[in-house]
Amino acid sequence: MFAKEFLRDINKTSLLQCIVFLLAMCLFFALNSSAFISPINLCNILTASSVIGLMAVGATFVIASGCIDLAAASIMALSSVTCAWAAQNLHYDGLALVGIAVATGALCGLTSGFLINFTKAPSFIITLGMLSISRALAFILTGGIPIYGLEERVTKIAEMQWFGLSLPALIMLGGMLVGYLLLTRTRFGAHSLLLGDSQAASEAMGLRVPLLRLAIFVLAGCFSGLAGFIFMARTNSGDPSAGMNYELTVITAVVLGGANLFGGRATIFGTLAGVLCLGVLQNGLNLMAISTFYQTLFIGIVLILASLLRRFGPNNG
Amino acid sequence: MAELKLRAVKKMFGATTVLQDISVEFAGGTVTSIVGDNGAGKSTLCKTIAGVYHPDKGEIELGDLKLTHLGPHETREAGIEMIYQDLALAKQHDVISNLYFGREKTRFGFLDQKAMTENAQAVLETMGTKLPSLTKPVGLLSGGQQQAVAIARALLFSPRVLIMDEPTAALAAREIEHTLDLIKRLKERGLIVILISHRLNDVFAVSDRIIVLRSGMIVADKSVHETSMQEVVAQIMSA
Amino acid sequence: MFAKRALLFLCLFAGLMINVGAQAANRCVFVLPSLANPYWQTVKLGIEDAAKENEIEATVLSVVNDQAKEEFVNLCQTAISQNPDILVVCTTADSITLRCLHEAQNHHIKVGLLDTVISDAAIKKAGIKLSFSVGTDNVKLGEKAAQFVVSQNKLATPKILILEGVIGNTCNACRVSGFKQELTKKLPKAKIVNSVSAEWDRLKALNITADTLNRTPDLNFVFAANDTMALGAVEAIRLAKKNNQVMVVGVDGIADARKAITAGRLTASVAQFPYLIGKRSIELAKECLHGQCSQKDEKTPLLVLTKNVLESHRDPLLKYVR
């Protein structure tokens, strides 16, 4: 069921260039590091990308609808804090913790969405405010000190494996699948893209724009919350300073995957490819033991190369 | 037959009165043109009917249904379609997405892409519209083709009222001919057609009735046989 | 009506100004980096406790983001405008510290440094007369970590991963260079398999450690330039089920790290004493205000926290571990 739409996405966006680029990077790293191509390492890349990946699914909808969500990473940190707090003080586990994290994220997303609708201000400004507020809430709730040392049954979540894939990686892939179905198969997804394409047309055609935008931000908040849960399980802590500057990484991943930063065009395949690009790059550089100075240089070069590649191929947008 | 009625409609933007005391009725199977100078309130009047704006005073009714406070979503449901001057298309989306803009077909809650594609092809065929590709972004089509998409979208769900804002302004001569033919056919199907246009030639070619707006007021409302181009021009211009 | 209100406001404002001007002597203003960090919160605690004890009025200002250099300058100017007797700053960016200190000196405010690494030459060149300086010796801290690694090592060529903090941060640079120098001196055959920045970030440290374990399955030690990264590395090692093979040494001795050490997850952490830094800075400030400025660069002690040290409760420094 994916094949046809995959081809369509390749036609519509610069997804193809992103995939070519991803494969080229994989080839480069495989030639330079024997450990790269091993199945364990490939699973590691997926696991390492899980937090960014989940946030990127939410960001795909936000960017598709012509908005920007700068608060994603702060909401992730706040969710990791509330979730760790619930694990430690209420002794919740499993799904109840997921519920807490997702609810925290949804609430933050709801606030962002409501404020954007209410003030009619650009999402950039409102979510920038929410970035500070949710980060501050995380600091206030914890007094600035991470909640650390969770019970065994919580940290076990990150250790679980199926088919050789870790649970965080599976949750990320599951999130991608849900995002894919929502974006391509439901009116909600279609309307998100239409809204990003032309808000005026959407209003004229009777889309309920404020409600739609609210739903989009709630969804993005849910994904950030889920990312916070994964963060908590993986690092065994609720850290108020978690994921500083991750919001930019998330946006980079989505745009790298061919989405239009100004809305109207975005695909989950692209987002997955973008996330993997960044994950592979970081992993490969770590495997090659390249010093940080050069890592930073490489990341910059790769971003620009990826943008250059977009000038070629079926879509010049 | 369903009638569209406006009673004492008044619309302000801030302190400026854009429409004052507009009372008018539109009957099915007629083409009514609204003409007037720039800023006379033509587009505002049409957008108020379409639910984009809400009147500050007065009532709008379609048959038994009160439209006064309904938004574009509900007025479209009620069968009022408007073709905007800028066409209101999603330029990065393909033809099918635009045809079903806001009214996507679903099956078990999921989009039914297959049904939409088949239906769209059938509708475009009956309209006699030829488009190079249904999967190309609409922004890459020519102006006339884009307009065809906007018209097809308006007709897709058999509306009762069709409002067209400057449909011929950006078209080549042959395309104008085609659009005017279409308007005549729609009239025969019993639709209420409301046309905004600057081009009086086109107006006289298709209209049954001409309404002249000036400063938000109706200054003339006559059957096309009772008036002439000179008279209409005079009514538009006179201070 | 408006005039009346404005007048009232002006009166209030004037009253406030007079109040500020008339405050008691021995006022000390601190400009610290982000308080959203357990380390600086402990420094603040030390300052406040000692200030109460020594009857000094201490105000602690802090920047929200310690990488925002401009914000530091603004805050420093705010501090100077409060006209304290003594201004104590901590910053990671040398040139900016000096500019701020120079300006304070021009306003006849005594200046002290807190946990800042600046060369004497640079201070002299800027024409600054320091009243005192107190803080951790980060080079020595790195050395201590290396010594600990050497003491635990049983192999001929142990493999070591170094997780650095944000590049450009002086503390980080000192810790890492101290560690590397001492290691090459004591154990020239040790192999540093990767030395890379995890930007003080827990998840990045986790991912880098996981990748390194993948490439170098026989890794023996991880040295992380702070505890947050060390704790991230610990989780990666736990997930790889290599707890018994890889030892992790962190820096700071924050509460979470101590918890992890007692639980046997983290091997050791080289503790600094932020509480002592705060306490000593007030004591030194008091001495200076009484005419005895030490002008010395005082270094607070360091302590390698291990499970043994923590459980034996014997070391007298432990009471300052917060």
Image (cartoon, coloured by chain):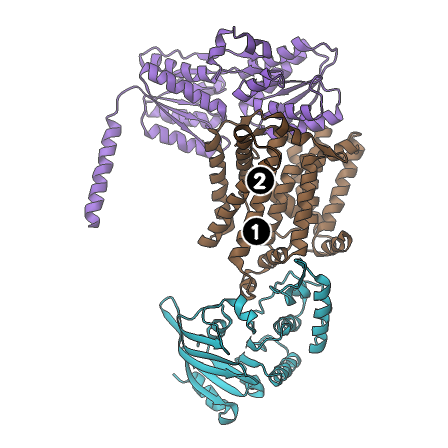
Q: Chain of mark 2?
A: A
Q: Which mark is residue C235?
A: none
Q: Residue at x 20, y 43 (%)?
A: C7
Give the SS element for disc 2.
helix
In this rendering, the label closer to the viewer, 1 or 2: 2
Alpha carbon separation for disc pair 1 and 2:
19 Å
- Considering every residue shown, the one lying at the far bottom of the view is B226
Q: Is residue A188 above or below residue B54?
A: above
Q: Residue A77 at what x, y percent from top left?
A: 55, 35
Q: Is residue B120 left or right of residue C227?
A: right
Q: Note whether residue A274 is visible.
A: no
Q: Left or right: where does residue A69 sit relative to residue C131? A: right
Report which quarter residue A155 is drawn in: top right
What tint does the image give chain A? brown
Q: Amino acid at mark 2?
A: Gly
* Chain that appears purple: C
Residue C67 in the image: state x and y as whole percent: 51, 31
- Residue placed under numbered mark 1 in the picture: A216
SS for callout 1: helix
Q: Is residue C133 above or below residue C240?
A: above
Q: The numbered mark 1 sits on a residue in which chain?
A: A
For label 2, the residue is A99
Q: Provide the letter of the chain coloured cyan.
A: B
**Residue at 75%, 22% in the rendered image:** C217
Q: Position of residue C71 (x, y in %)?
A: 44, 34
Which mark is first along the chain, 2 or 1? 2
**Which residue type does callout 1 highlight?**
Ile
Mark yes or no: residue A216 visible.
Answer: yes
Instruction: Please tell me how crowded label 1 is: few (under 14), some (14-19), or many (20+) other residues with Cα within 10 Å.
Output: many
Q: Residue at x 48, y 90 (%)?
A: B230
